[in-house]
Amino acid sequence: MSEMTPDAPPAPARPGFTERTPLPKRFYKEARAAATEGGLFRIELDGRPVRTPGRNLVAVASAPLAQALAQEWDAQRAFIDPVTMPITRLANSAIDGVASAMTEVGDEIVRYAGSDLLCYRVDTPAALVALHAELWDPVLAWARERFGAIFMLSEGVVHVVQPPRTLELLAGALPDDPLRLAALNLMTTLSGSALLALAVAHGRLSPEEAWRAAHADEEVQEQLWGTDAEALVRRAARYRDFEAAARAYALLES
């Protein structure tokens, strides 16, 4: 079989993807990572290179990340399910989209920082006030120490304008390669916080710690009112993508 686009699943596979969408059949026996002459590592299916939906070669700068990508392909059974391949979808997005829109993607992260989740506090209930302080204050202190970025806090939903210098410093801290930037952007949009995403990228928080911090409000609500099974399922699906982005970022560092 020549190169074709079950080479790569649609990315990112969420809108328009339903259980009734037919999945492509697995057409290969073996998936593996292979070094290229340019020092990159590509993914091969029975020796043939994987390409993105945009027909670009899937090649990354990290052997461990390439292995993780190959493992996602190798884990597919009779059909190829993009939902179970979050790192592959991230790589496709980085190669096909982010690489040609670095400024726009970086600007989106900075916009999140301008109204970052961690800057908006409550005065009640006491349990939530305490949890915000416990989980969010150390991240703000870390950002001040690590980047020199000082964030202003607000109570309730009243917008607070962050110092321009703070946003400049955060913009200067963004990665300059598409895959890292794509991973950071995905962590930011899923958590609602550029600061939590940066804390994970720099090893200040684990993905689990950042995800808990992003859902402090839900944690207290569930303590008071109980859990919603459907909401938990949706949150678990989003966490899968968040953790995959964090893992991809970490593998690029190894």
Image (spheres, grey):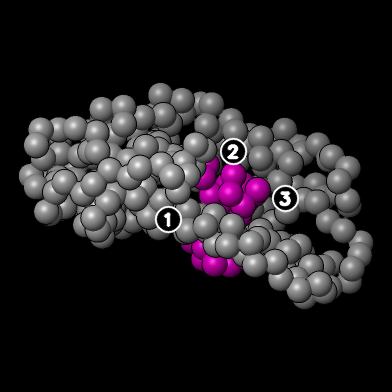
Mark sitting earlier along the chain (1/3): 3
Identify the amino acid type marked 2: Ile
Q: Quadrant of residue 164?
A: top right
Residue drawn at x 64%, y 62% is 230
C-alpha separation, residue under disc 1 versus residue under disc 2: 18 Å
How dense is the environment of label 2, judged by Cα within 10 Å: few (below 14), some, or many (20 and up)?
many
How dense is the environment of label 1, judged by Cα within 10 Å: few (below 14), some, or many (20 and up)?
many
Q: Is residue 243 magenta?
A: no
Visible in this render: residue 138?
A: no
Q: Does the magenta stretch include residue 187?
A: yes
C-alpha separation, residue under disc 2 versus residue under disc 3: 12 Å
Indicate left or right for 108 with 99 as reference: right
Identify the amino acid type marked 3: Leu
- Residue underneath mark 3: 117
Identify the amino acid type marked 1: Ala
C-alpha separation, residue under disc 1 versus residue under disc 3: 21 Å
Which label sits in the foreground, 1 or 3? 1
Q: For this rendering, which residue is in front, 144 or 28?
A: 28
Indicate left or right for 130 with 144 as reference: right
Residue drawn at x 16%, y 46% is 27
Residue 109 circle label:
2
Horizontal and vertical percent position of residue 136: 71, 62
Q: Do the numbered discs 1 and 2 sit on residues whose CB atoms are within 8 Å?
A: no
Residue drawn at x 58%, y 49% is 190
Q: Is mark 3 on a helix, strand or loop?
A: helix
Dominant SS in magenta: helix
Horizontal and vertical percent position of residue 49: 15, 39
How dense is the environment of label 3, judged by Cα within 10 Å: few (below 14), some, or many (20 and up)?
some
